[in-house]
Image: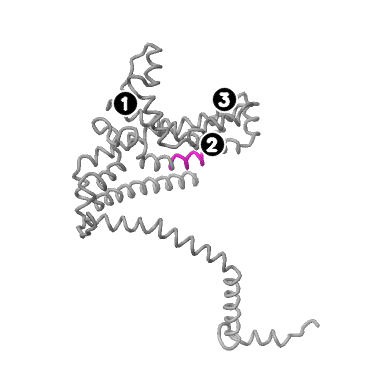
């Protein structure tokens, strides 16, 4: 009946919230509800806990251990705290600055080739009407090849005497090149091989982004009489700006950690240290130079971590400003 107040409602108003028997009852019901939720999702929490333990042990613990080791002298199982001596040693080493110069050169060349070329290959694939699926497989095929096999293939191509590239130059009556054996061309040769080995994955990501662009935009551009370049500039690039920015950051981070291609193609150093990168210098400190000095290698890894974190922070700042504009 309207206007009648039930005893249950009266008791709830008269009892202060969170105090007395009613408060304890509400707290007990909340605890009981929480317990029921935990029991109901026990298997999910178990999987989550296991994943967190594995992630912490295999991902975060090595990073923390590396930071600690960068302030220690760890050699042949014996550990001594040395403070900033490891950092002073690598900053005084001329190879440190030479390796950074080579790494930035590799990153710049890899961005010119490895960032632009997959995008234009994806644009061409997106414009094709026939055999698109077969061409996607052909483009992605080098990614499925083991890196060692791909490197051996390019070592054959780069051979100055009987390699494929010099045979092509001789056929065209052009001067041949020493490729990996010359300090002037060794780094470019490594970048070409690395681009061929990795461009398939980036091309497919670009192609997926291109196929997400609404067709109405291209139809409107066609009505305005836009050609391929104008559609590329005014429709394709603005619509794929986010994925382009993301891949640019990922490629900078990946290319600055390059190790496999220079190590397998040129032994790590190359002629006159022309292909020595920072990660290879870490390898030398840890296993070759100075006899297993993991502390100096960890200090160099820490410097590299700070540089890459700086790039990531700069990218995040620029992306935030661009979104606000």
User: Closer to the observer: label 1 or label 3?
Assistant: 1
Question: Tag 2: Cα neighbours inside 10 Å, few (<14), some, or many (≥20)?
Answer: many
Decide whether residue 179 is among the magenta residues: no
Q: What element carries label 1?
A: loop
The answer to whether mark 2 and mark 3 are in CB contact below 8 A is: no
> Which of the labelled discs sits on residue 228, or is there none?
3
Question: Which percent across, then down, holds residue 186?
Answer: 31, 28
Mark pair 2, 3: CA separation: 20 Å
Whether 134 is drawn above or below 45: the answer is above
The answer to whether mark 1 and mark 2 are in CB contact below 8 A is: no
Would you identify the image quadrant in which residue 232 lies?
top right
Number of marks in the rendered image = 3
Q: Of the residues under marks 1 and 3, which one precedes in the sequence?
A: 1
Q: Of the residues under marks 1 and 2, which one precedes in the sequence?
A: 1
Q: Is mark 3 on a helix, strand or loop?
A: helix
Which residue is tagged 1?
185
Whether 30 is drawn above or below 282: the answer is below
Which is the main secondary structure of the residues drawn in magenta?
A: helix
User: Closer to the observer: label 2 or label 3?
Assistant: 2
Q: Is mark 2 on a helix, strand or loop?
A: helix
Name the residue at the top extreme.
Answer: 173
Q: What stretch is highlighted in magenta?
A: 237-249
Decide whether residue 245 is among the magenta residues: yes
Which residue is tagged 2?
204
Quarter of the image where the N terminus is located: bottom right
Whether 41 is drawn above or below 30: the answer is above
Q: How is the image coloured?
A: one colour
> Which of the labelled discs sits on residue 304, or is there none?
none
**What residue sits 28% from the left and 25% below the top?**
182
Q: In this view, does 19 lie to the left or right of 169?
A: right
Q: Is residue 213 left or right of residue 54?
A: right
């Amino acid at each position: 009946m309207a206007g009648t107040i039930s005893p249950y409602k009266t008791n709830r108003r008269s009892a202060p919230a969170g105090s007395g028997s009613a408060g304890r009852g509400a707290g007990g019901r909340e605890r009981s509800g929480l317990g029921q939720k935990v029991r109901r999702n026990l298997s999910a929490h178990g999987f989550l806990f296991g994943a967190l333990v594995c992630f912490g042990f295999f991902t975060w613990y090595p990073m923390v251990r590396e930071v600690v080791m960068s302030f220690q002298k760890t050699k042949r199982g014996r550990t001594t705290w040395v403070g900033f001596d490891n950092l002073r040693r690598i900053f005084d080493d001329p190879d440190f600055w030479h390796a950074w110069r080579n790494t930035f050169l590799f990153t710049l060349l890899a961005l010119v080739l490895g960032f632009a070329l997959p995008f234009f290959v994806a644009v061409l694939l997106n414009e094709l009407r026939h055999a698109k699926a077969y061409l996607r497989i052909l483009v992605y095929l080098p990614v499925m090849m083991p890196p060692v096999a791909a490197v051996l293939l390019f070592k054959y191509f780069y051979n100055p005497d009987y390699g494929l590239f010099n045979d092509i130059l001789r056929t065209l009556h052009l001067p041949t090149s020493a490729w990996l054996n010359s300090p002037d061309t060794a780094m470019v040769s490594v970048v070409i091989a690395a681009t061929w080995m990795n461009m398939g994955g980036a091309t497919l990501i670009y192609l997926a982004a291109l196929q997400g662009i609404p067709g109405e935009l291209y139809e409107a551009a066609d009505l305005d009489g836009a050609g391929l370049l104008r559609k590329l500039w005014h429709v394709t690039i603005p619509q794929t700006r986010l994925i382009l920015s993301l891949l640019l950051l990922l490629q900078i981070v990946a290319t600055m950690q390059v190790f496999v291609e220079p190590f397998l193609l040129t032994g790590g150093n190359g002629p006159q240290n022309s292909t020595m990168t920072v990660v290879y210098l870490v390898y030398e400190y840890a296993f070759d130079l100075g006899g297993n000095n993991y502390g100096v290698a960890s200090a160099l890894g820490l410097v590299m971590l700070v540089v890459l974190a700086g790039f990531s922070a700069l990218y995040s700042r620029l992306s935030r400003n661009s979104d606000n504009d």
